[in-house]
Image (cartoon, grey):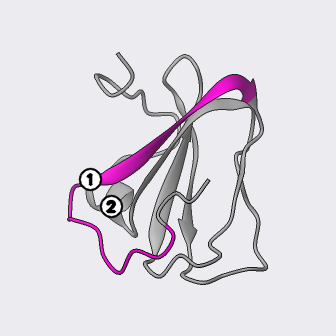
Amino acid sequence: QLGLMYRCSMARDSGMLFVFDTDEVQRFWMKNTLIPLSIAFITRDSLIANILEMAPLDTTTPYLSSKPVRYALEMNSGWFQTHEIRPGDTVHGLLD
């Protein structure tokens, strides 16, 4: 439930993977999260549904998956764009 709250930084290629018990539309927020993050919502069949940029300390914006997903991967802001990872791409190795 705390996720990356209260952290001041995160290593360049580190992140946090959330694994959910069921496929549902997921909602994230940035309360008490001090670093800007990117989040990829990933379906049970390893497809990236959508990627969002999340602003630090934003308590008003709900960051939602575009469809029911099984996973969410938070990385430093811009990480997915830098690595040319887009919605529709397949995730390999991460979920095995």
Quick check: 36 above or below 51?
Answer: below
* Residue 45: percent from left, percent from top: 54, 16
The numbered dot on residue 83 is: 1
- Residue at the image position 62 percent from the left and 72 percent from the top: 30
Q: Is mark 1 on a helix, strand or loop?
A: loop
Few, some or many C-alpha atoms within 10 Å of disc 2 (few <14, some 14-19, many ≥20)?
some
The residue under label 2 is 79
Q: Would residue 6 be counted in the magenta stretch?
A: yes
Q: Do the residues labelled 2 and 1 touch (CB within 8 Å)?
A: yes
Residue closest to the eye, 79 or 81:
79
* Residue that protrudes farthest toward the left in the picture: 12
Q: Give the range drawn in magenta.
A: 5-23
At 32% from the left edge and 61% from the top edge, which residue is drawn?
79
Mark 2 secondary-structure assignment: helix
Mark 1: few/some/many CA within 10 Å (<14, 14-19, 20+): few
Compute the Cα span from label 2 to label 1: 6 Å
In the image, is 48 to the left or to the right of 12? right
Query: Residue at coordinates 56% horizontally, 79% vertically from top-left?
Result: 55
- Quadrant in the rendering for residue 36: bottom left
Above or below, comparing residue 37 to residue 93 in the picture: below
- Residue at the image point whose x is 73% and y is 44% from the top: 26
